[in-house]
Amino acid sequence: MPSQDSSPESQAESFASGGSLRALKALGQCCRVLVRAQDEGRLLVEVCRICTEWAGYRMAWVGLAEQDEAKTIRPAAQAGFEEGYLEQIRVTWADSEHGRGPVGTAVRTASPCVIRDTGADPRFAPWRDEALRRGYASCAGLPLMHEGRTLGALAVYAPEKDAFDETELGVLQELADSLAYGIMALRTREALRRAHDALEEQVRDQTRELAASHERYRALVESSQDAIFQLDRDARLLFVNTAGARPLGLEPATLIGKTLAELFPQEAAEQLVPEVRKVFDSGVPLTSERSIHVAGTLVTYSTVLAPVFGADARVESVVGIARDVTRRNLAEAALRRSEARYAQLLESLPNFVLVVDSESVIQYANHPVPGVSIEQLVGSLGFGHLVPEHQEQCRRALGAALATGQVQQLEVLDRYGLWWSCQVVSLSELEGRPLAMVICADVTARHAAEEALRRKEQSLRQLLEVYERHRQLMAYEIHDGVTQPLAGALMTLEGTVPLLQENCANVTRQGFSRVADLLREGIAQSRRLMGGLRPPVLDESGLPAALDYLAHEVRKDSGIEVALALEMEAGRLAAPLETAVFRIVQEGLANVGRHSRSPSARVAVLQKGDRLRIEVEDQGVGFDPEAVDPARFGLQGIRERARLLGGEATIQSAPGRGTRIAVDLPVVKAAAADDE
């Protein structure tokens, strides 16, 4: 193997006597490398190395033509004195300044291109400085051609000018042609390997699909064995497994060496043999399905034929996998019949069932709707049958079902006055598009009942508001009509008593004092009565302040320590609701004072979203809720208040374990006028 001096002058001196001989040496070595090549990248590196070490070229590299917009040439391998040259230059195969060098021209024109003097040839101007710095006096670009397509180019650089004569250039082009053939052979081998892997994956997928499509055939599929065989170009068996021999009633060994024409009827052989030869000629796998007579029985086989490549990248045999799909086809027919039965079942369902695509176009309807036939429904836009304000809601539900696979539920009103409770269920993709089933139940009657109930609740709410207003007016009337005159009489008496002379009868003085005491008591009682009808603090400061006031009064009057926990959103609640909450807490604390003998109590009012939770709890003697005297209306009043406001009250207690009253109410905000 010739040595290589890094000095351009010394290398040019020894290079001048080379010529065609050095190119032939390189060609011979490259042919040996091509025969053993298993990897494209390694092959390219070896060829470049041979060009520099065996032929004595100063540097060689292989560039592959990219099919991008800039028509880039990507360096794939190099050898020799390169010293970063390929990192410093830019080469394309476009007809531009960086594409008119030897490599770009060779790729673009599919012909060899020689630069005999890199220092003088204007085509080499973009790369001249870097080339001369490394001693590249001349260079040649050889296109890598395969079946009329240019894969790239082989570039060789010589240390002397005018280094490439016609003979040498011809040998180098033959080397480039061999390299192109080797590249394509390796790529074809890799593609066929991937195709073979994909084919095996397809067989596995078909097995899984068959097992999933019909459960009753699972045992048959799992226990079945495919026929595996190997054939030569004459469709002669080189190998067959037991499953392949079993249908013929023979042992595998007795079938080796026999042709398909000897084993199968003439009609089947005339179809199978050309397929085997087609795989040999094309090197591409082939899939087919046909019915043939085997041992007097008509059997349907799904067959895959795949090429097996030898070391020379030629197809040396064909491997086949044949699966008996006779029963699968029968199962598919049974499945189609089953689908017809399911369709009949759907048509008999009372629910309204639709199948729609992702745009809501109706593909199937099991029933008509009032005023619209099935024929008019199918093919129409499902959203178009809904009132406009419900179309977007339905569109979102359909999109979510198809995207997530989760069942979506909603209620919509159609243009014909019917309410539907719908479930949107994603189906597997059929005919290459996503579909969904919409199961609809007519809930028009329920909506009518709910509307009637809503109106009744509204009437009840208005009645409660009138009742509350009435109590408020009564409080005002007591204040203005009873309390004020009593207060005036008291003031008059208090002002008159000091004016009495010392000689007035003691009885008279005592009578005045008694009248004053009665007036004071009457005023106090009227104020308590007004507070009972509508606590002033509730009107003036709101529910939190009223509950704080109530807790304070309980502590003052009974000595019970009340722990108050309030978590409420800003803003006033509706007046009936505030009064009800106040009364419930008031009644609960009254029960603690009267019956529990507990020194403390806990009151919590918690608002979460549209629900209000009220809890009154003590650690007293407790009681049996089932044994409460019906004549005691405190607890019953709490339950009734909760029921009237659309809520629920629960009372938990047991002897010796305290009592807990919990009330859950819907939140109703105060109107703007009430807030003022």
Image (spheres, rainbow, N blue to C red):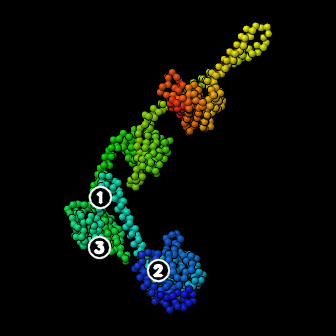
Q: Quadrant of the C terminus?
A: top right
**Disc 2 marks which amino acid?**
Glu
Tell me which corner region of the image, top left, top right, bottom left or bottom right, holds residue 382: top left
**Disc 3 marks which amino acid?**
Asp
Residue 547 in view in this figure: no
**Disc 1 marks which amino acid?**
Ser
Circle 1 SS class: helix
Whole-number angstrom distance, CA of label 1 to CA of label 2: 51 Å
Whole-number angstrom distance, CA of label 2 to CA of label 3: 34 Å
Residue 353 in view in this figure: yes
User: Which residue carries the number 1 mark?
Assistant: 223
| Residue drawn at point x = 47 percent, y = 33 percent | 450
| Residue drawn at point x = 37 percent, y = 77 percent | 312
Q: Position of residue 566 (x, y in %)?
A: 61, 36
Residues under numbered marks 3 and 1 in contact, where contact means CB atoms less than 8 Å apart: no
Q: Position of residue 196 (x, y in %)?
A: 37, 67
Sort mark 1 into few (<14), some (14-19) or many (20+) by Cα contacts within 10 Å.
Answer: few
User: Which residue carries the number 2 mark?
Assistant: 46
Going from N to C along the chain, the mark reached first, 1 or 2, is: 2
| Residue drawn at point x = 54 percent, y = 87 percent | 5
Circle 2 SS class: helix
Whole-number angstrom distance, CA of label 3 to CA of label 1: 30 Å
Circle 3 SS class: loop
Tell me which corner region of the image, top left, top right, bottom left or bottom right, holds residue 12: bottom right
User: Which residue carries the number 3 mark?
Assistant: 232
